[in-house]
Image (cartoon, grey):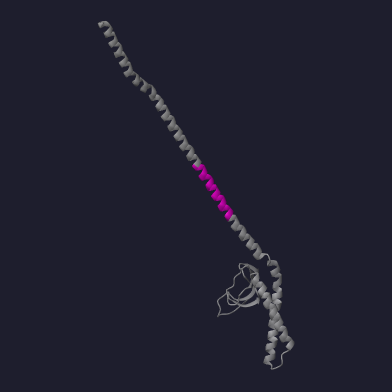
């Protein structure tokens, strides 16, 4: 009996040792698996962050390109609008230039009629009624023509008393005048006109003081 009891006691101790050993072994066996899973999760997370970063960069790239394209389109629209406005502004330049001699004839006719009427007044003679009526008609025609010119931004230059500008004036004659600054326009022989506010339609022919 003593021998059997001793054998059972040894067997129980062995089982206890085995039970104590097994959890450690199990833990040791499971540890690498946990480490591998954690490593895989870390790699996936890093890959996700990298992909997200690349996507953000791609989005910013296309956003920048879209903004640049929009800015270019806006600039193109503005340039086109300016070109259209210029084309419309100067479209009638050739026709307007052909009308300038008509404006000259009307102005000369008015000057002649006014001088003749003034002479008649000075000589105390009756002025021809036909001439008076003609003057009124010509003045009305001139006024209508000037209205049309204004509508198309065609303007007569103001030259007398200003300084000669080679871009606007054409000198026909120089004269001595100590009271005026050299290059001052003292007389206009033919009116000058601009169109659109910045383009010369016809130079003014002028007489200036000597330099």
User: Does residue 63 show up magenta in the picture?
Assistant: yes
**What is the quadrant of residue 167 in the picture?**
bottom right
| x then y, percent, for residue 46 | 44, 35
Answer above or below: position of 149 versus 44: below
Q: Residue furthest left?
A: 2
| x then y, percent, for residue 78 | 59, 58
Residue plotted at (43% across, 32% down): 41
- Quarter in which the C terminus is drawn: bottom right
Q: Please state which of residues 207 and 86 is positioned toward the viewer in this rendering.
A: 86
Q: For this view, does 63 lie left or right of residue 138?
A: left
**What is the quadrant of residue 132 in the picture?**
bottom right
Q: Residue furthest front?
A: 1
Residue plotted at (39% across, 24% down): 32
What is the span of residues highlighted in magenta in the rendered image? 56-74
Q: Please state which of residues 195 and 160 is positioned toward the viewer in this rendering.
A: 195
**What is the quadrant of residue 9 in the picture?**
top left
Answer above or below: position of 51 versus 27: below
| x then y, percent, for residue 152 | 65, 69
Q: Residue furthest right?
A: 130
Residue plotted at (68% across, 86% down): 115
Number of marks in the rendered image: 0
Q: For this view, does 211 lie left or right of residue 130?
A: left
- Quarter in which the N terminus is drawn: top left
User: Does residue 68 show up magenta in the picture?
Assistant: yes
Answer above or below: position of 63 versus 185: above
- Principal secondary structure, stretch drawn in magenta: helix
Q: Is residue 48 visible?
A: yes
Q: For this view, does 7 lie left or right of residue 82?
A: left
Q: For this view, does 65 lie left or right of residue 205?
A: left
Q: Residue furthest bottom?
A: 124
Q: Is residue 203 visible?
A: no
């Amino acid at each position: 009996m003593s021998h059997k009891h001793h054998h059972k006691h040894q067997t129980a101790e062995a089982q206890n040792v085995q039970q104590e050993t097994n959890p450690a072994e199990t833990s040791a066996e499971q540890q690498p698996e946990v480490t591998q899973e954690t490593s895989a999760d870390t790699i996936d997370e890093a890959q996700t962050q990298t992909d997200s970063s690349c996507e953000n960069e791609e989005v910013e790239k296309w956003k920048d390109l879209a903004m640049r394209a929009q800015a270019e389109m806006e600039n193109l629209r503005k340039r086109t609008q300016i070109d259209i406005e210029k084309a419309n502004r100067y479209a009638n330049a050739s026709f307007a230039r052909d009308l300038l001699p008509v404006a000259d004839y009307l102005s000369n006719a008015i000057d002649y009629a006014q001088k003749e009427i003034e002479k008649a007044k000075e000589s105390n003679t009756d002025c021809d009624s036909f001439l008076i009526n003609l003057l009124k008609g010509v003045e009305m025609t001139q006024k209508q023509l000037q209205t049309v010119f204004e509508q198309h931004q065609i303007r007569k230059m103001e030259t007398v008393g200003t300084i000669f500008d080679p871009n606007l004036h054409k000198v026909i004659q120089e004269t001595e005048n100590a009271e005026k600054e050299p290059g001052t326009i003292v007389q206009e022989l033919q009116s000058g006109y601009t169109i659109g506010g910045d383009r010369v339609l016809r130079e003014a022919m002028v007489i200036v003081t000597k330099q």
